[in-house]
């Protein structure tokens, strides 16, 4: 995590996001009734929709839009030699210090320099121990015996599942270098400090793409992938002044990295890593050759059957961390003064300005009144829209309150069925961002929604 060099200007705070996430069913604390489980969170009805849509958008970007990238879903448990080869058994450690007095634990790179020098606990002033390395991999056992022969690890990154399958994919799918393999899946790290809600957790999800290239072409591809990943966030409508690049200095790079950049996002707690783009060189495939005894070389038919270990450019984004980023990025509060315009009244409106392709609910159908056949008409309309859109239906309370509820869930469109709808078969389409309302013929509604989604431009 880097220093905060820019003041955070958004309206979100971690407290507001955490509380809204719980209130609206985005994210709950894991096993809350037992006091919660540190570093683990559960995604509720709106949260799973948001997470799935972010994952879907990344998957489309990687696989559907790139002919040279294919998907994979590898297992979480892998042969333990994998993690020796990858360097994780030896190197995947955080330096840890303990307070002898209050027993708090810290990553030594996360406490102020002066405390480290004085060996003084930042919480209670007690004496700190010397730093010692702590491996972040979760270890467990497979089978009935809990001995060294049965040790397996929960994967700390999804990447290795891709590397060990790279030859399978070349053979089964006739891939030719340069090509990529994309994967979304769970990863586990025994993080010492888990804070800031879902930012850093022990169980999380990653969206990783490993791109295999000819040695010597790696730097060009590295630059291309940096550009593409930047453009992706722009396409999602993320506030671009909340994003920046951070290059890892040579002495801070992971053991495998020839070059490494992070895309950092300006979260309420400051600039923090969102995604890493790494040039992993031929380190991983070289090590798997050594540890497995299998030849991981690529035979390049387009270059006189030259044999080489490909270089790998990795783009590694946290899916769950992207959920937090999108929640913070979308969060807005505004004073609503034009009393009565949509019946919501004079107050502070909380609104999640999700891109419509990411919003958990795309369109909410609301009957103005429950009676006089309006509820039936609205229900009927909802059934019609269901096939093509993610919908919600709400008939409880004043219409303005219902709009506010949808704003807070980030629903970009509300459709209201009123008395006129019975006569002229038209409905009111209300836009979340501007709160504008237009009258649309019921028969044109689906098409209009599709157009609005496609042409959506974030204004605030
Ligand atoms: P950090 O330095 O913050 O611990 P890292 O540099 O080790 O992270 P990578 O190994 O590059 O992270 O992981 C790639 C991505 O996976 C990160 O950019 C982040 O989005 C996500 N990620 C990593 N660790 C966690 C975690 N504990 N909780 C949630 N997401 C994580």
Image (tube, helix red, strand yellow):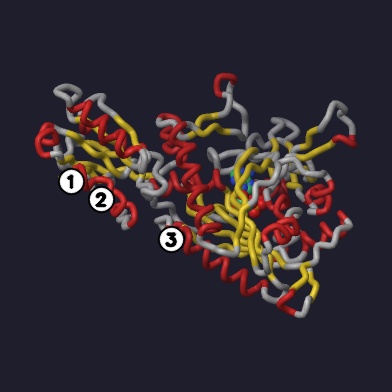
Residue drawn 79% across and 53% down?
A: 86
Between tags 1 and 3, which lies in front? 1
Q: Which residue is mark 1?
A: 440
Q: Earlier in the sequence, mark 1 or mark 2?
A: 1
Q: Is mark 2 within 8 Å of ligand 1?
A: no
Q: Earlier in the sequence, mark 1 or mark 3?
A: 3
- Residue 187 position by quadrant: top right
Above/below status of 334 relative to 170: above
Q: Which residue is mark 2?
A: 448
SS at badge 3: helix
Task: Measure how far apart labels 3 and 2 are at the Cα level.
Answer: 24 Å
Q: Which residue is mark 3?
A: 234
From the top left corner, tell me how far across and down residue 110 is, in percent.
65, 47
Residue drawn 26% across and 31% down?
A: 380
Q: Earlier in the sequence, mark 3 or mark 2?
A: 3
| Towards the viewer: 27 or 169 | 169
């Amino acid at each position: 995590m880097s220093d905060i060099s820019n003041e955070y200007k958004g309206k979100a705070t971690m407290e507001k996001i955490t509380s809204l996430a719980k209130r609206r069913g985005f994210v709950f604390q894991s096993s809350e009734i037992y006091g919660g489980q540190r570093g683990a969170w559960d995604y509720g009805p709106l949260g799973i929709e948001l997470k799935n849509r972010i994952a879907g958008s990344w998957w489309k970007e990687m696989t559907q839009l790139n002919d040279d990238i294919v998907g994979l879903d590898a297992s979480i448990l892998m042969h333990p030699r994998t993690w020796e080869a990858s360097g994780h058994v030896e190197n995947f450690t955080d330096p840890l210090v303990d307070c002898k007095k209050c027993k708090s634990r810290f990553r030594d790179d996360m406490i102020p320099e002066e405390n480290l020098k004085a060996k003084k606990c930042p919480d209670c002033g007690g004496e700190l121990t010397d730093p010692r390395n702590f491996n972040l991999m979760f270890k467990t056992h497979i089978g009935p015996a809990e001995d060294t022969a049965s040790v397996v690890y929960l994967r700390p990154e999804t990447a290795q599942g891709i590397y060990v399958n790279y030859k399978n994919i070349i053979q089964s799918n006739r891939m030719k270098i340069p090509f990529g393999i994309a994967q979304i899946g769970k990863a586990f790290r025994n993080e010492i400090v888990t804070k800031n809600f879902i930012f850093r957790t022990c169980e999380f999800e990653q969206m990783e793409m490993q791109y295999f290239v000819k040695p010597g072409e790696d730097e060009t591809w590295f630059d291309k992938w940096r550009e593409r990943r930047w453009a992706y966030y722009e396409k999602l409508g993320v506030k671009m002044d909340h994003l920046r690049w951070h290059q890892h200095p040579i002495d801070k790079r992971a053991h495998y990295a020839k070059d490494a950049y992070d895309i950092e996002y300006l979260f309420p707690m400051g600039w923090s890593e969102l995604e890493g783009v790494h040039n992993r060189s031929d380190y991983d495939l070289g090590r798997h050759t050594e540890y497995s005894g299998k030849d991981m070389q690529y035979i390049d038919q387009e270059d006189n059957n030259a044999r080489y270990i490909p270089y790998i450019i990795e783009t590694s984004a946290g899916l769950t961390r992207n959920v937090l980023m999108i929640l913070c990025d979308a969060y807005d509060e505004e004073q609503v003064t034009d009393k009565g315009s949509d019946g919501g009244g004079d107050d502070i409106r909380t609104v999640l300005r999700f891109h419509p392709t990411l919003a958990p609910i795309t369109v909410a159908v609301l009957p103005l009144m429950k009676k006089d056949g309006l509820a039936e008409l609205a229900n009927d309309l909802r059934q019609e829209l269901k096939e093509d859109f993610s919908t919600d239906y709400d008939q409880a309370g004043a219409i303005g309150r219902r709009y506010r509820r949808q704003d807070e869930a980030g629903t970009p469109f509300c459709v209201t069925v009123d008395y006129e709808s019975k006569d002229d078969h038209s409905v009111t389409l209300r836009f979340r961002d501007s709160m504008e309302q237009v009258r649309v013929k019921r028969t044109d509604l689906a098409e209009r929604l599709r157009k609005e989604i496609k042409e959506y431009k974030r204004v605030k």
